[in-house]
Image: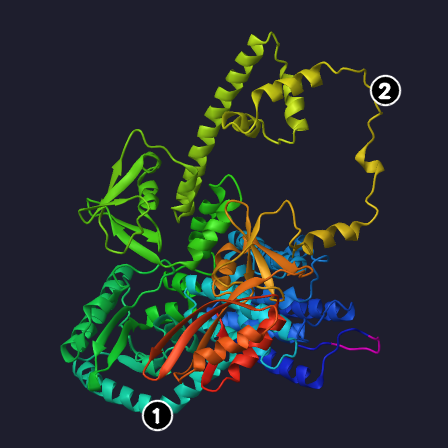
Amino acid sequence: MKIYQNNMERSFTFTAEERHETYILVKRLLKIITPSLSKTEKRLVIKSLNNAYENDVLQRDAFGLNPVVKSLQTALIAAEQIGVGRDAIIATLLYCSYSSDSYDKEATANLFGTSVATIISGLVRIQKLYKKNPVVESENFRNLLLSFAEDMRVILLMIAERVNLMRQIRDAENEEAKKRVSQEASYLYAPLAHKLGLYQLKSELEDLSLKYLEHDAYYMIKDNLNATKKSRDAYIERFIGPIAEKLNAAGFKYHMKGRTKSIHSIWQKMKKQQCGFGGIYDLFAIRIILKVPEVDDEKKYHALEKTQCWQVFSIITDMYQPNPKRLRDWLSVPKTNGYESLHITVLGPEGKWVEVQIRTERMDEVAEKGVAAHWRYKGVKGESGLDDWLKNIRTAIENSDDMQVMDEFKMNLYEDEVYVFSPRGDLFKLPKGATVLDFAYTIHTNVGNRCTGAKINNKIVNFRHVLQSGDQIEIITSNNQKPKRDWLTYVKTSHAKSKIRFALKETQVKESLMAKEMMERRMKNKKIEMDESVMNQLIKKMGFKQTTDFYHQIADGTLDLNIIIEKYNELKNPSSVQATPIPVRSAEEFSYENPNELGESISDDVLVIDQNLKGIDYQLARCCHPIYGDPVFGFVGVNGGIKIHRNDCPNAPEMRRRFGYRIVRAKWSGKGDSQYSTSLRIIGNDDIGIVNNITSIISKEEKIMMRSINIDSNDGLFSGTLSVNVEDTQRLEALIKKLRTVKGVKQVMRV
């Protein structure tokens, strides 16, 4: 691919290294796409990139990366590691040559086909979104899912692009942008890759995110893995040696390898089990990949695959003691993303538990390349088969009467599944965390609306009970039961939420009709004739967009009927004659003087935390105890109140992942003379008088008040929690430094 250059001054040019890398990448890519790409199409792609270069459309990103090189790298990842075809590769290469304002979908369709044009359209839409608000929030995900619904490959390419970006920013100096894209990779792209079965890319995204966001933890685990690699490899050889002998004797064709767990998964286990690296024993898994003879009949081929996997399972469990609780059978019931495998944990030499994964070559490719490989193996020609998989997503979107289904579908994307049974033995699949109420609505809407509880495994539970795989459920109903608003917090699936909302709307409509009848009777008693047009005018004047909302507030007592009737009389019979009406002018005669000002005010909206703040109900979160000076954000509660959290609050990642749309930016105003409560964790040697030394330092500090101290001692060490009131982070940091100087104190940290 030749990018021409003349003497014109441009904001973008190629370096010598970038030209060389472009040549190498193009050579690799042509080997993959040459069979499906004509010479004319190749010329058109090159011409499009050259035109973008000549017209100075190409721009480096926040990290200074070359857009053409980045597109080629992304296309290679999409082709080699995901398995996308011609249309997606062309779209990836062309995407960088379009700006969000210059893209012509019709012209692109005429040159490269409708499919390519649609994919680029989805990518351009995401580009526009990130220019407005480059933060992982529900708005981002909502638009992402819209692109997802239009063409599945948009999401696949976005995952490939983010993997490539995470690889390239290792030495980037822009730390803020680096942290942002790493958080997005962790919260958004890694879970999407997991849901689509792209486990290799998912692990890479998670590892790189950990590397950039928690540098010390990443390298601690990496160094430990390197230090133990020799002994680990030796153990794997001792473990698989006897297995290989048995498999060879049985005539299986296979290959076997040991796979070390990802650094991210090890870190998550360390946090979950609250232990160091030495406390994690299952650092690796053994994978046995069988080569099954080809059979023309697809059903017979799949049956042969399962038979061989179970035969290998039998051989291994005869040699090593299995743990029945750790059996994972994804052969009988594959995951929704097509993942099939048989996992068993056995007790190996030296009393160590070892996980063994048994699968075929077909299953392994599906596991590595995800949904694209899944459809290719199902015998679908080209990429049209993705549309079948996509119908489920479209159904979830089209059946909703509002955009809230997007947020709920987001939560479904992030979760695994549980499998439960009806009393007749029918198998149902639900997202992890689903409740009895979710199951009731899965059976039938009327069953859900009248659900009062259930009998699970012959034990009666309430409808909020969270389901576990293997539960057998019998729903209990009552004709007197009806949905309530708090039910929305007890269900997980978007289907149940939409049915509850629909029932609540029906109830609201009935209540509104009753309220309207009550108003008409009250007005009739007062000899007032109700004029529908005047009433509609009053409703709009009071700020109600929907008539039902107005009558609903009358029904629940929020609005006083007598006051409404007075306002109605004033509107219908004004006390004074109105002035001559001003002629109505068209909106086209007016223009906004400062158009830029409006956009800035929306995107830069920040909650300013001030002790004199009125009209907003806010509190400081108890989970992280923010104080003046801490970087903070606001989290809007279900009741409208706002809680202020520290940016590094332990709950922050989960809130951003699940409820990003409820997060607002926040900053402190003048601190005044307010004091804030916070806690410190102190660890040290249990020396005589050390507690007195600690409390003595605090008592000498101005404007710092100790509220409580709780000390535990064990084996010559003490650990304790110290609660103090301080004005700001500056005074707190000074106090921490002084406490660290106390003889015997090992560690002081903020809780």
SS at circle 1: helix
444 relative to 218 in the view: left or right: left
Q: Nearer the viewer, mark 2 or mark 1?
A: 2
Residue at the farthest left position:
318
Q: Is the stretch drawn in magenta largely helix, strand or loop?
A: loop
Name above or below for residue 661 compared with residue 550: below
Q: Which residue is mark 2?
A: 580
**What residue do we see at 23% from left, 55% from top?**
470
Q: Residues within 10 Å of mark 2 (few under 14, many from 20)?
A: few
What span is colored magenta in the figure?
A: 4-9
Label 1 is placed on what type of residue?
A: Lys
Label 2 is placed on what type of residue?
A: Thr
Name above or below for residue 398 compared with residue 95: above
| Occupied quadrant, residue 241 | bottom left
Label annotation for residue 265: none
Could you tell me residue 577's position as x and y percent?
A: 81, 15
454 relative to 658 in the view: left or right: left
Q: Which residue is mark 1?
A: 230
Q: Residues within 10 Å of mark 1 (few under 14, many from 20)?
A: few
What quarter of the picture does the N terminus occupy? bottom right
556 relative to 592 in the view: left or right: left
> Does the stretch in magenta take in 6?
yes
